[in-house]
Image (spheres, rainbow, N blue to C red):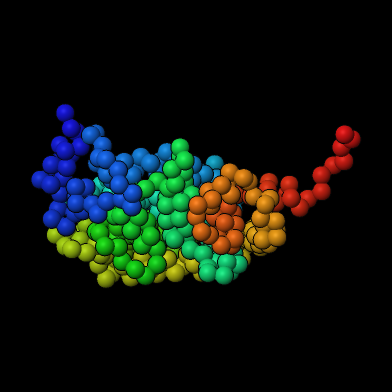
């Protein structure tokens, strides 16, 4: 029995005319035979979940660096919330849930330690700039490797969705467009929740116009945004919000930038994180051989600038790993008699 063929037939008969069917994928960079049990997008999802870079997300900052408390989001829990919102939307709109889930789970694999602070520092240091969505593609194409195979060899649609989840470009698939909205819905709302928990903002200080339209509670706001997207995207060849909900969401996002993301009190430790990354970057520029041999081996048959190799390594570290790395390199160690 070929289960994959049965799933592909179910997709063909039940999904929207605008959905991306697994059987219509543009395929992978390197040819692989089909699986008899899973569709191509299911295989991509599984490869991402089993990757080392996915596991490292649990120790990477979402908003608050090294927060004291078990309930603050990490980059991993953010990713899971994006995937959950994405699948809810995809099921309602009869789009390909497996494609949405794969894109959502892989969209932040290239994020740096210390969240967007790390991204900003590497963007300043690297001659060609640094953007986490582009780095996510480097992760799945080059940096993840197993059994001497370079990259995860994901399908075109998953890679394209990951690349275009951030920035001005719009994904070619509705599933990719959907993840972009799911990402924004997730981070705006859970960052509000974390900021209130951290005492950075108060619930009463949220923009009244947004609250009136979207709702007073965390759940109400997410529900309003999701229902609005479903209503305005149903039987449509584009994923979109209504003007009123879209405007209210943008007002809330602007409020978060002003009061949380760029707030000096909330980001009081950022200058230390910036210093750690900058010093390590400069150190490896002059001591490239100090990088782990396992990392250097990745580039044996790949033409890369030294800056790319260093950025790949630093971006792949977790918050706690890079702090320990900095301490080991730059802080004096106690004298030991040998």
- Residue 7: tell me if it is visible: yes
Residue 312 is drawn in which quadrant? bottom right
Residue 182 is drawn in which quadrant? bottom left
Quarter containing the C terminus = top right
Point out the residue furthest to the right here.
337
Q: Position of residue 68 (x, y in %)?
A: 61, 46
| Towards the viewer: 256 or 220 | 256
| Towards the viewer: 210 or 151 | 151
Q: Position of residue 13 (x, y in %)?
A: 10, 45
Horizontal side, residue 280 vs residue 143: left or right: right
| Towards the viewer: 243 or 271 | 271
Point out the residue furthest to the top here.
1
Q: Position of residue 232 (x, y in %)?
A: 20, 63
Q: Residue at x 54, y 41 (%)?
A: 70
- Residue 71: tell me if it is visible: no
Point out the residue furthest to the front here.
301
Q: Residue at x 50, y 55 (%)?
A: 302
């Amino acid at each position: 029995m070929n289960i994959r063929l049965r799933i592909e037939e179910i997709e063909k008969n039940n999904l929207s005319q605008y959905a991306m069917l697994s059987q219509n994928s543009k395929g992978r960079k390197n040819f692989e035979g089909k699986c008899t049990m899973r569709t191509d997008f299911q295989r991509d999802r599984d490869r991402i979940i089993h990757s080392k870079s996915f596991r490292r997300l649990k120790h990477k900052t979402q908003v608050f660096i090294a927060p004291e408390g078990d309930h603050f989001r990490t980059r991993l829990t953010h990713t899971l919330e994006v995937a959950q919102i994405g699948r809810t939307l995809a099921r309602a709109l009869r789009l390909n849930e497996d494609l949405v889930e794969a894109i959502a789970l892989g969209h932040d694999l290239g994020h740096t330690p210390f969240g967007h602070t790390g991204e900003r520092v590497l963007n300043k240091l690297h001659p060609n700039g640094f953007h986490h969505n582009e780095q996510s593609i480097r992760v799945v194409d080059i940096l993840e490797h197993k059994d001497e195979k370079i990259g995860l060899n994901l399908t075109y649609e998953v890679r394209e969705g990951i690349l275009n989840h951030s920035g001005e470009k719009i994904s070619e698939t509705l599933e990719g467009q959907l993840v972009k909205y799911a990402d924004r819905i997730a981070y705006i709302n859970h960052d509000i929740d974390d900021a209130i928990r951290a005492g950075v903002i108060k619930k009463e200080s949220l923009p009244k116009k947004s609250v009136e339209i979207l709702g007073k509670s965390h759940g109400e706001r997410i529900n309003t945004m999701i229902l609005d997207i479903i209503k305005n995207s149903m039987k449509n060849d584009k994923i979109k919000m209504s003007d009123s909900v879209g405007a209210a969401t943008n007002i809330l996002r602007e409020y978060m930038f002003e009061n949380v993301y760029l707030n000096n009190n909330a980001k009081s430790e950022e200058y230390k994180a910036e210093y750690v990354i900058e010093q390590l970057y400069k150190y490896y520029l002059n001591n490239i051989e100090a990088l782990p041999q396992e990392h250097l081996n990745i580039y044996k048959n790949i033409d890369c600038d030294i800056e790319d190799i260093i950025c790949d390594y630093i971006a792949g570290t977790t918050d706690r790993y890079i702090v320990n790395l900095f301490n080991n390199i730059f802080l004096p160690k106690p004298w030991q008699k040998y």
